[in-house]
Image: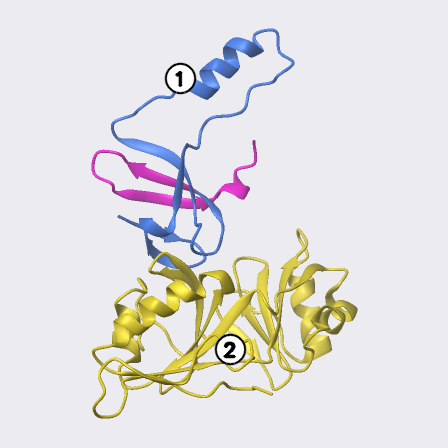
Amino acid sequence: MSEGSNSVLIPGRTGRADGRAGLLVRECQGLALASLVARRGRVREAAEAARAAFGVALPLVARAAGNERVTFVWAGPGQWLVETSDARGDIEAFLAPALGSLAAICDQSDSRVVIELAGTAVRDVLAKGVPIDLHPRAFGVGDVALTAAHHVGLHLRQVSEEPRYRISVVRSYFGSFRHWLESSAAEFGCEVLAPLGAG
Amino acid sequence: MRIPCPHCGLRGHEEFAYLGDATLRRPDPAAPDAERAFAEYAYRRDNPAGRHRELWYHAQGCGTWLVVERDTLTHEIGRVTEAREQGGS
């Protein structure tokens, strides 16, 4: 929406203006996304086929598993959201040779906004709307949750110890989610950084 | 009220959509008393005080239909299973 790009976040500071911002936000651009839904009774076969083709088995619980090529994010029983920066525009062809006979594959690249959240106040900000426990004893690196904040469905996972979280939101709801996020982060300061993977 | 989703763990009821009685079975439309049976099925619902088996959909979670045992007096949640394990209609 800004500078002729399809960016949904404009870099800059909102909320408390002094000191280091408690919440750091960046959009992840250039990702290819696909939904992967195993055919009935084929979940384990699909998991094995993914391991053979990509070196990563599909996680069968609420976890994400990936390598430098591709990440499979659990999205419900027998369902995954596939993320890769390798196959923008052609993710179905990327997955189909290994998984096309075992699962339904559908390109979701433009359907979600993917952002990363970090900063010293990130858990405090998320706690204002995300109803699940993100304390390290309950939710750690690689854990995935499907939940909601501010009535907007979220696909959330922790990607590093700092902590850093990656959230995908259905694109048409993102404006509403961003409003909630910036309001919730205002007391800590919210810094939108330059997008990741742009260009 | 929190419902232990077998896939997502303990979640607030606001993540779920409620359908109702999980014990009902769709009548046979070819049966001679189908009209009466469908009227019963569609309109004459019990309103039990106490333990009830109900369908809940994890709408803002994993998208699974669940059969939840709930006490309608205390909101105590009992056994939770996947609806797909029950079969039926």
Residue at the location (56% across, 86% down)?
A198
Asked if the stretch drawn in magenta spans residue A93, the answer is: no
Q: x%, y% of residue A78?
A: 59, 58
Which residue is the site of mark 1?
A: B44
- Between the residue at mark 1 and the residue at mark 2, the CA separation in whole angstroms equals 53 Å
Write down which chain is painted blue. Answer: B
Which residue is the site of mark 2?
A: A7
Residue at the location (65% across, 67% down)?
A47
Residue A39 occupies which quadrant of the picture? bottom right
Instruction: Note whether residue A62 is visible.
Output: no
Q: x%, y% of residue B4?
A: 36, 53
Label 1: which secondary element:
loop
Front residue (pair B9, A68): A68
Q: Which one is closest to the eye, mark 1 or mark 2?
A: 2
Q: Amino acid at mark 2?
A: Ser
Q: Residues within 10 Å of mark 1 (few under 14, many from 20)?
A: few
